[in-house]
Image (cartoon, helix red, strand yellow):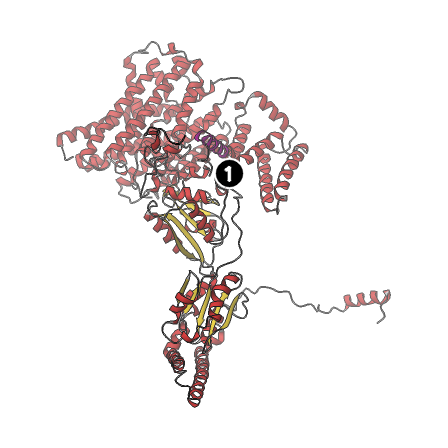
Amino acid sequence: MIDNTVFTVFNSFKNIINYSPPTIPDPFVLDETRPFDGDPPQKDLEPNIEKSVAHFTALLRYGKRLSICIDKVLIALKSNRIINVKAELKAELTALEEQWCELSPLLFSYHQSQSAEALYISTSLEENRRILEYIYKLPRNKDVVIKEIELTGTPVVQALVIYMEGLIDGSKQDHFVLKPLMNGNIAQDIYTGNFIERVIKKIIPNGQVHETSTFKTVEEGVNRGDTVLIVDGIAQGVIIETKGWEHRAVNIPQNEQTVRGSQAAFSENLRTNTGLIRSVLRSSDLITEMVKIGTRGQTNVAVMYIDSIANSSLVNEIIRRLKGIETDFIIDSGQLAQFIEDYPTLIFPQSLSTERPDRVAASLVEGRIALLLEGNPFAQILPMEFFGYFHSAEDFSVKSGIGNFMRVLRLFGALISTILPSLYISLCYFHPEAMPTELLLAIAGSRENVPFPAGFEVLMMEIVFELIREAGIRIPGILGSTIGIVGAIILGQAAVTARIVSPIVVVIVAVTGLASYTITEFRMASAIRLLRFGLLLCAWALGLVGLAIALLGIVVVLCTMKSFGMPYMSPITPRSIAGYDVVLRGQVYNQELRPDALNTKDPRRQPTISRLWKQKPPEKGGNQ
Amino acid sequence: MDYNNGRMGMSEGIALAFIVTFPTIFLSAPSSEVAMAGSVAWLARILAGFIAGTLLFMLTYVFTRYPGDLLSVTEKLLGRFAAYSVGLFYFLALFSLASFWTREFAENTILAALPYADFSFLIACYILSAGCLLFVSIENVCRATYLLLPFMIGTLLLVWVGNLSLYRPYNLFPWQGNGLSSLIQPILMALGSSVSLFILTLLAPAFQSVKTIKGAVIFGYGGSVVLRFISVGAFIMLFGTNVAMEKRLPFYEMARLIYLNRYLQRFEAVFILMWVMVGILAIAISLYGALFITAKLFKLPSIKPLLPVMTLIIGQIALMPPDSQSVIVMETILYTYVLAPGVIMIPTLLFITTIIKGGKK
């Protein structure tokens, strides 16, 4: 048809008149019924047929292997080389005999009823490969590599090397696994004595090599970056440590920066993190227990404590709670803490999150326990009392006077951050007489043109401040903080100019926001920010009476809480021996006792007189 | 929540003894005492404190011979009927205190903080707050009190020190005031208002030992007596007896007088934070005491189901008096003529019975 304006108009008109369904395919709609749930229907109808098919297939494969073996025997007999290959053939036949036992209907049915991970390694390389392919969903899964190699020597022996691409160190694998196996002329030893033991002791030059006989451990090894070797004819495997995935190097702390003290922070590598703690605290008493969490993730959690200090029942309880977690996968140590803490619904944190190895070491010495999650650069220190959240890593790096001044400043910051907006609203609405007259007149003057009530004004500005803060975190790179600062200044100025808010409210919200950043622990700061909104509403409704009721409620909740069995407000209430490091800290040489509430095995940190040199007279003479 | 669970220590005991005897400072009691005894009202506080302390120590002696709580010990010494009578007496006392305090703190809140608030709404605020606190157990309420103690004492010190320039010591003269005989009624009244102190003996098994109770009496109640005595003295020194007896809210009026300079004056409102907290805590503990006795008398396994009902009843009773003046009159009669005799007689009777009966230590 001619493509001109007349025909275009005609065709458009015709399309409108003569409706035809669109030719595009239906869009994807996620079906609410899940066909993958449960067994496939054909399996339910004929459950035995599939099992029988699998059994016959396995028998056929076995028959094929047997036939190859018989051929080998025939060739050896015909060529009169039977003496030379006797050992090899004997081993091969023994393996076939074992495989035959595995194929007995009873045992085969039992294996089929088990999950693949629960199976034992077979003497048949082919069967092993099939099971591994099933476990790792090969060839769909491109991360797992099952490499077939030949162990050099006479006869040539087939073997499988299994590893996870991206988790291993290639050069480590080349040097410590493949080269010794493929260039070592080792295959002749395979059928004499314990070959696996010889591989571990003589052939693989690697510190962490161990044998295995189940697919469960094979799977765990491969998933954590090890290389697994399975040799034909041997119902065992060798797990060789070849971890070497890419990770961030040890860096300076991002969230807990200090002027003094260590400048190292944790990274995502668990072993690097435990090593960092050990590098600070070189104690042979420092124990690192590993607990696996997550039925799918199988993430390692390191539980670190000093055996001669930490309360055993506390350690046992934490390990019990960790082992009692039933979930797919845990990605963050904060998420882990919520799984094991006593009051997960309350907003206050019950464990201290830190990225500093020195802080972890200091806490371990106090008798606390540290949890480190694989792939997470934060350690959780527990139990932790309320006042501990206002301590900083450098409190002890400076003289006690300065350290105490900073602590008081932080507590004052927390107090301002909690109650300043609600106090302003209470005084504004219910008790203006409490403000100096000049200030009151200034506030009244600045609020004259603002069309909103003071409560709404403060609430609005608080929400805007939170928006700026959240946006500042989410905006990538250095732009985030810049936009945060610029946004706050411009928005504040513009809001005052536009007479949406009064300048005093901008000042109050800015001071409150600034004060909240003095709190060293992010989660405690977040909890206090959230409380601020609740207190604001109480003050808006009932003034100082509402504020008093809300504050009393908070205090009672804090007194009720326990952090892993330890009272949250200890050592103040319930009263226990406080030591000199609660709200304020004493001199370093007066820090004689560990926190009493932790009930440590050894409550004394240092003797009453720790500066022994004060007791002795100076030595006379010496080098001039 | 079991009604006698937990092991409370010295700090909880101190807080408990302090908070149940301290709130009268914030109410009209100092004015009433000045009206009765004149410039010697401060002495009534000391003497009443001494007598109540002695009575409590007599009871601790009984507990060293017969371990248990006040009701079980009374049952052992005087029989079941006496135990029920004693239980009913303390129930009445604590229940009345909770009702009166709820009413008075609500009245004071209207006067000092929320003049436009609905009266019943404030009663509901106080009693519901107290009820909610009790859901987390008495130990934690005591711990919270202990945590707030320094702030309470600090507030009082601030008010006293803030008014330092306004004190007229000659207002305390003549030392004998209206005559020493006029002290009898305020002493009885102060004794009656101290009835809640005996909650320590009701909860005796919850404390670590009798020594803990003794410590709580010395430091908690002793501290409270000292503060109350100084407070009444300061009140008289500030206003003189003639003006002081007219004041409805002595503490609030004292705070109102503070004038440090033109920027720091009239900040009495800030102290509302403290007396509201004290009020709620005191109501909560009295309420707990009443619940505890009910549960003990009826042999109930837990007080939790009773809590909402009792809270509601106390709230309703607090609403009943027609005005605040009638509350003060009823309170004075109850303290002086009903509670004070019981406070004196019950411990004395138990002490004498223990002496006569003896008993193993």
Q: Residue at x 28, y 21 (%)?
A: B48
Q: Secondary structure at mark 1?
A: loop
Q: Residues within 10 Å of mark 1 (few under 14, many from 20)?
A: some
Does the magenta stretch mainly form a helix, a strand or a loop? helix
| Residue A187 spot, x, y in % from top left | 44, 74
Q: Position of residue A154 (x, y in %)?
A: 45, 78
Chain of the residue on which disc 1 is drawn: A
- Residue A130 shows in this picture: no
Q: Where's the C terminus of chain A, which quadrant?
A: top left
How many labels were placed on the picture? 1
Q: Is residue B51 above or below residue B358?
A: above
Residue B275 at x, y percent in the picture: 42, 28
**Residue bounds of the magenta highlight:** A399-415
Q: Is A500 part of what is drawn in magenta?
A: no
Compared to A164, does B279 lie above or below? above
Q: Is residue A596 left or right of residue A75?
A: left
Q: What kind of residue is marked 1?
A: Thr
A527 to the left or right of A304 = right
Q: Is residue A108 left or right of residue B217?
A: right
Query: From what the image shows, is residue A53 above or below residue B61?
Result: below
Nearest the viewer among A76 and B176 is: A76
Q: Nearer the viewer, residue A207 or B159?
A: A207
Q: Residue furthest bottom?
A: A78
> Percent x, y for residue A146?
50, 70
Examine the structure image and report whether residue A402 is included in the region drawn in magenta: yes
Q: To which residue does mark 1 refer?
A: A258
The image quadrant that residue B123 belongs to is top left
Question: As rendered, which of A601 and B356 lies closer to the eye?
Answer: A601
Quadrant (top left/top right/bottom left/bottom right) for the N terminus of chain A: bottom right
Q: In which quadrant of the rendered view does residue A584 lie?
A: top left
Is residue A430 among what the camera can see? yes
